[in-house]
Amino acid sequence: MVTVRDVARVAGVSISTVSRALSAPEKVAAQTRDRITAIADDLGYQPNRAAAGLRAGRTGAVGLLVPDLANPYFAAVAKGAAAGARAHGLGVFVVDSEEDLRLEVDLLRSLAAQTDGVILASPRALDADRPAAGGKPVVVVNQEGPLAVGVDNAGGVSLALEHLRALGHRRIAYVGGPAVSWSDAQRRAALATAAGTGVEVVALGAHSPTVDGGAAAAASVIASHATAAITFNDVVAVGLVRAVRARGLRVPEDLSVLGFDDTFLAPLVTPALTSVGADLREIGRRAVDLLVGRLAAGTTEGPTRRLLLPATLAVRESTARPRA
Amino acid sequence: MVTVRDVARVAGVSISTVSRALSAPEKVAAQTRDRITAIADDLGYQPNRAAAGLRAGRTGAVGLLVPDLANPYFAAVAKGAAAGARAHGLGVFVVDSEEDLRLEVDLLRSLAAQTDGVILASPRALDADRPAAGGKPVVVVNQEGPLAVGVDNAGGVSLALEHLRALGHRRIAYVGGPAVSWSDAQRRAALATAAGTGVEVVALGAHSPTVDGGAAAAASVIASHATAAITFNDVVAVGLVRAVRARGLRVPEDLSVLGFDDTFLAPLVTPALTSVGADLREIGRRAVDLLVGRLAAGTTEGPTRRLLLPATLAVRESTARPRA
DNA sequence: GTGAAAGCGCTAACAG
DNA sequence: CTGTTAGCGCTTTCAC
């Protein structure tokens, strides 16, 4: 491994000059600097981050804790975080908790210990556990917290209702997700305030965010006499579409179905799903930005920063005018 | 931050005893050890990996380079790698090259510099660039290399052909993927040797591994007079199904379509796709194992190790007997 | 503008 | 079985 010593020896300068030339160029004479950079490049010198961090008190990496990396939602957030980190010259440690809530506290602790800060992209309520980060800044995704990035669920609900109302729907069911979900709570609140604006909303109980969860909701959706259903996410929508079709109803003719998240699944299924989404990668990117901002401030405590990214509506085939 | 010194002071021992108690317990008296672990736990001591690694010459982390983390295929591999790394007490640095081939060499270099080894999950041919890892072991996924993990594509092709032949298909089209893909090359080779075993295979040119790629292949698939088509991956299959349907043909009645990868997309689309797959997470897990094995050996060069994971066939609705 | 030297937190000889 | 000491590669005062 090529170290600063090697570069220094070849360049005929001290290791401090090499260090400065590489990390604080303005403190070194232009000529010396250029020579050093050339030699470093030539020798294939790669700074050892561990060593640099050890001395500087930073690790040069951020942590990302997700419940399931194979879930397209979190995969997109992770991709954004990776891009954001790279833009800031940071590395990303990715940890997958495999949906194990108890494990998450431990993972957060050890992740925080070896990074400069952590992005917590778990939809659970971990407020009480945040001290586990040991003073390191924590940015939460779609959750409450002093440093938070999330989707504007209220805005998303408005878009959905607006779209369905314009089509002529007056009675709409909401197939909700897990009780612990912040997003679900936000949406339920938004749906509740929407009541009385010309549409009736029937909020259905908590369902598992899976195909089976959607299928399980079919009976109550049909019983509700709603002409349209908004689902917790696209996968639930797929399950619901299947199950109502199996009962002889057609989508969207007999029931309009509107998903959430607008994952790449939405345009691929039949009928292609109308879905409320947001730029998930941007969430990851912004989360890193928030972290870097706090890091730059140097203060462990700082002002509250909450970012709400706009929701979008992709209209496809699964929503249409109600019959008669 | 709590350091070994703090623990040592409270425990009334030297820092080396603390270090040993935590990383080589058998070298410390049971009583002392227990007291130290208790105190460490109590103080919330978290070893600083950067420091430990600096001294030991290891970083305690492996790198994972993927072309697109939002692609379910690589997301699954990443998830497996994260699980495998955690099982070995290692961290995972994830880097997304965003499909930029030129960037990959640089990314590989810097990733290798700050990890103990790298998993290269890019389907491109990077042999020439592997020296960029600077002597660190590199495990490639679905590629040629001294340390490699991949899916048994030949076996997968056999399963697919066997299934289609049993259904009665005698003329089968293969909608291939990018020319740089190792998997595609493996499959083409396997398909070529299968010719003459009672089925005719029409290998169609390189197509983009997207919905549009599948749609673009529709005309030549139909022109080939094949009664079944095997596609490069599930997304291509979806595109093909759409396009042939748009031309008035039915799937599977007029054309059977068989995908590859068996991603979670396969069971969700209509008709649900018959697909050849493999345990993608296992790929990530095994890649880490290979890396750890080489790391433990200590030698920078070592015996060639190639792992081929078995392919599986999930039969669903998109394949059926050909008409008449 | 550059060099010498200290030290980040930890592990690994080497003594005792 | 435990303590002392050196030093991993780097950044950062402090002198010059």
Image: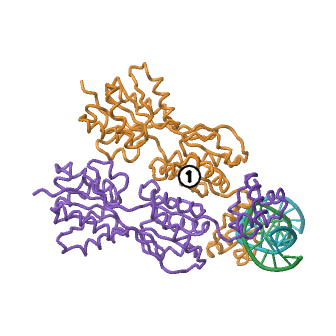
Chain colours: A purple, B orange, C cyan, D green
Label 1: state its secondary structure: helix
Query: Which residue of the protein is positioned furthest toward the left in this rendering?
Result: A324
Closer to the camera, B307 or B9? B307
Left-right relation of B288 to B59: left
What is the x, y in percent for residue B30? 70, 66
Quadrant assignment, res A150? bottom left
- Amino acid type at image mark 1: Gly
Write the residue at 33% across / 30% down.
Answer: B228
Write the residue at 29% across / 54% down.
Answer: A273
Instruction: Tell me: residue B181, above or below residue A96.
Output: above
Instruction: Residue under label 1, please give it.
Output: B84
Q: Is residue B20 at all visible to an observer of this figure?
A: no
Quarter occupied by the C terminus of chain A: bottom left
Instruction: Tell me: residue A205, above or below residue A211.
Output: below
What is the x, y in percent for residue A255? 19, 56
Quadrant assignment, res A59? bottom right
